[in-house]
Image (cartoon, rainbow, N blue to C red):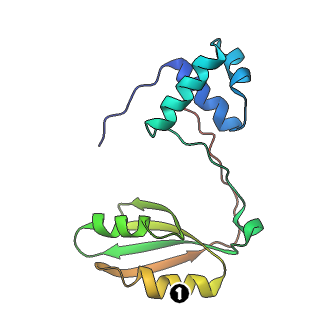
Amino acid sequence: MPSRVKLDEVSKQIIEHLQQDGRRSYAEIARAVDLSEAAVRQRVQRLIDTGFMQIVAVTDPLQVGFTRQAMIGLSVEGDLTPVGDALAAVDEVSYVVTTAGSFDLLAEVVCEDDDHLLTLLTETIRRLPGVRSTETFVYLKLNKQHYNWGTR
């Protein structure tokens, strides 16, 4: 496991403010954490540059034309890394994790419709070297999705 980088309390507070509202101004955050606006801007940029965090617009897939989401469980023969890397390179795949349990890998996909999902499964994912089997869990309803879990 990679060693965890320690964040000071001020950086943790900055992250938590941005998790609540990624558009919050540096000036507003600076007042809340008792730093200058420039210091907050520098800390945020350092957190982004080091890959510690990213600031993105999270959309509702249905509202932007992607009506089918699914989680795909994959059983793999041999080394999991090449399959995980190949999945991560697929445009429709938004999330890939190596797991313990019934599946070796889980991949979340966002597709335009069922035909798109079927094509992705049959022409891309199931053809990856090492993929033994897949099981697809089609999303019927998104009950919860959040990114404000804070810091430790």
Residue 134: image location, x then y, percent: 42, 80
From the image, tell me which residue sits under label 1. 119
Q: Is 9 or 101 nearer to us in this picture?
A: 9
Q: Is 124 or 77 nearer to us in this picture?
A: 124
Residue 150: image location, x then y, percent: 58, 34
Residue found 64% across the figure and 72% down from its top: 139
Task: Left or right? Give the position of 72 relative to 142.
Answer: left
Residue 117: image location, x then y, percent: 57, 82
Residue found 47% across the figure and 67% down from its top: 107
* Amino acid carrying mark 1 in the image: Thr
Residue 144: image location, x then y, percent: 68, 55
Task: Left or right? Give the position of 88 relative to 22.
Answer: left
68 above or below 115? above
Residue lying farthest to the right in this orientation = 63
26 above or below 117? above
Res 113 quadrant in image: bottom right
Task: Left or right? Give the position of 4 relative to 18.
Answer: left
Please tell me how crowded label 1 is: few (under 14), some (14-19), or many (20+) other residues with Cα within 10 Å.
Answer: few
Image quarter in which the N terminus is found: top left
71 above or below 152? below
Q: Could one spot residue 144 in this view of the protein?
A: yes
Res 98 quadrant in image: bottom left
Q: Could one spot residue 103 in this view of the protein?
A: no
Res 21 quadrant in image: top right
Residue found 37% across the figure and 84% down from its top: 127
Residue lying farthest to the left in this orientation = 78
Task: Left or right? Give the position of 103 relative to 116.
Answer: left
Residue found 60% across the figure and 83% down from its top: 116
Considering the numbered disc 1 on the image, is that residue within a helix, a strand or a loop?
helix
